[in-house]
Image (cartoon, grey):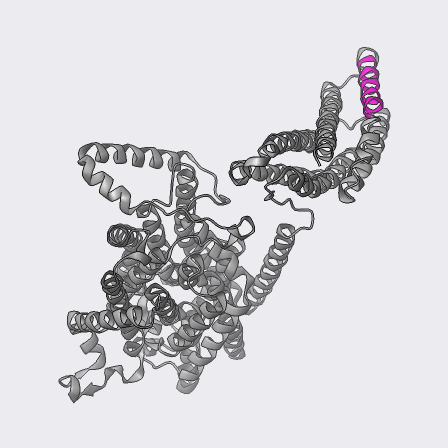
Amino acid sequence: MDNIYFLMIVALAFLAIADLIVGVSNDAVNFLNSAIGSKAISFKTIMIVASLGIALGAIFSSGMMEVARKGIFNPGEFYFNEIMFIFMAVMITDILLLDFFNTLGMPTSTTVSIVFELLGASVAMALLKIGADNGSFSDIGLFINTSKATEIISGILLSVVISFSVGALVQWVSRLLLSYNYQKKKKWVGAFFGGLALSAITYFILMKGIGGTSFAGEEFDIIGGMTIKSFLETKVWWLITLNFVVWSIFAYILMYFAKMNIYKLIIGVGTFALALAFAGNDLVNFIGVPIAAWQSYQAWVASGVAASEFSMNVLSSKVPTPTLLLFISGIVMVLTLWLSKKARYVTQTEINLAREGESKERFQPNFLSRSIVRMAVGLSEITSSILPLSFRERIDKQFKKPVITLARDKTYEMPAFDMVRAAVNLMVAGILISLATSYKLPLSTTYVTFMVAMGTSLADKAWGAESAVYRVAGVLNVIGGWFGTAIIAFLASGAILALISFGEGTAIALLLFAAIILLARNYISYNKKSKEIRAEDSLNKAESSSIQGVIKETAENIAHVIKRSKKIYSNTINGLSKQDLDMLKKNKKHGDKLSNEIEELRDHTFYFIKNLDETHLGASNFYINIMGYLTDIAQSLEYIGKVSHKHVNNNHKKLKYNQIKELKEIDLKLEEIFNNTQKAFEERSFEQIGKILDTKQDLYDLVSQKIEKQVSRTRTEESSPKNTILYFSLLVETRDLITATMNLLEQYYQEHDSSLNRL
């Protein structure tokens, strides 16, 4: 039986490595987004700076490890075997929970997850002990460190409101001071802002760097016999003032003599500082529990006492964390940062929510987001009516965005937001995290950095009338996910603890196996999703400014649409003939995906027209018509897929042999036309379109014949209303699909001929 604890230590070691990987994938969003979104420095430089911050932060993080040992529960109330079960339940829950959110691309809080997992597992173990001893539920307070747990949880929740509010206020003041033309401001303005930002970030680095080292508790005569840690905590304003003066002078010198962009320096230093904070503050979330388990195991082995009788009072005393373990953890984190694709997927969520202007909106508006936006608009109108006109005009002038003209093939190079906002994000987040660290609170760096970024976005008027409901919905979704994290972490870790307590070794083995299966499944699912995003048949936005260019660009999209349409229609008929629900379900998703992609192309129409040259405005009418016909094709396929799936899913009668045979006949004819159309557009052999159009009437006649046959069958032999409705729906929608396809070909054929005549 004693060997089980050694095996648990080995399992926890592997879980710690896996947790580091999924944790960094989740939390990379915290320190990468400001630099990536502003494009102030190259991606490679960002990664190098962040890697250095992580490596140093990992080495300096031993101080926060106490949270895993005694921050949530009273270790003296538990025996060694119970503590090991708690730690195992926590780690299994944590890795599954974080990987689940990473797969969704949603940034969640590793701090909240570990705190509530420890709370859930320890509460469950306490209840089991109380039940075994016939105790009272009120005795649970003996096992849980309620005061510290309440302090941690309230601090985490309060950080959401404070981070958003402070971020919004500082950004608003910064924009009033600097405007969007910050590069043209007098150098003393930039030096003042640089001194303020860099002094705050430097103090943050001192708190998170030197404050976490082993010699931070030593006394030095040069600072009046105080320890470094107490000096940093008591001489806050003196240090910040000195830093401000030094950095302001240094910033002015760099701007005046070296012609350096001070905002790039702020963003670089801020990225390093946040990476340092992430490793220093959040490393406890990934390896704190395994290290506490290892130290518990060492103490138990040395004691010679039975596992069920060895009290864990040893965890109440401060035990230094081996630097080698911290160094290895830092290496794993740095490698994950460079290699993890999920880390970059998660970062896109915050960047898109904070982006200036339009972007592909990931979240759909809901009642709450619409209500919040309406209320905000109403408050804005009331405030505007109260303020003097001259004051409003002066403010609006500072918030007026400059018009930036880029070549059409360079629009992707536009940053999501400017360097002022990126600098404010880093400065405010650094200040808030350093304050929390000085009070030994394991603050959620995810909550702070995300809410600061959202507050600065709101204050910077990045959420306009075109995007506000989507962005607010996104923020609500992320916050909802955070609260979901707490609830799921608490309940899941408690449930897993109960299973381990009753099943012991067998339960642990089964749970670890299940965790491996789920992680592998999520990995495969994510890779599959990534491949779908990069699919070769995906549609591309038109960027050309001439009619000839639009014809060539849209030809590729049409070839892809026709290819996918052929597959969707054929799979529908095959799925109905075989009553294959899985095939119809997948096919329905493909139809929905095609419809969504075409809708995105239509949303691009505004920007396409704005980019047209004056001499080629006729291309807009052609493009609008093409988009309309593609939409009609997608809607027909979407409807055909939906009604077919619904029919089989509801277990209605199978289509009769003659009906399937007739649909197959139409499918074969359509497949021939789709193949010829695809070939014509792929080879840009537009003269073939005329031959395809010549077959239009034959296809219409074929569908009309099938409709007449079904009318006759319905009057004489048909007995299933659902069957009849489905068959008529398929035929009528097929006719609409043919009409949209032929209209598309005619439009293209006519415009191609006209463009040749103009040459």
The foreground one among 184 and 486 is: 184
Q: At x 34% / y 82%, what residue is drawn?
A: 320
Pick out the residue farthest to the left. 224
Q: Main secondary structure of the magenta part?
A: helix
Q: Residue furthest front?
A: 759
Residue 459 sits inside the magenta stretch: no
Q: Which residues are magenta?
A: 696-713
Which quadrant of the figure has residue 747? Answer: top right
What is the x, y in percent for residue 434? 27, 67
Expressed as whole percent of the image width and height from the top left, the position of residue 240 reads: 20, 70
In the displayed structure image, the side of residue 710 where residue 222 appears, left or right: left
The correct choice, above or below, for 753 with respect to 140 in the image is above
Q: Is residue 744 above or below residue 104?
A: above
Residue farthest along the top direction in this orientation: 715
Q: In this orientation, does residue 490 appear?
A: yes
Which quadrant would the C terminus be assigned to in this image? top right
User: Which residue sits at x=43%, y=66%?
Assistant: 86
For residue 144, side relative to residue 3 (left or right): left
Q: Position of residue 485 (x, y in %)?
A: 42, 53
For residue 391, what is the image quadrant?
top left
Q: Number of labelled discs?
A: 0
Front-most of residues 577 and 601:
601
Is residue 74 among the parts visible in the rendering? no
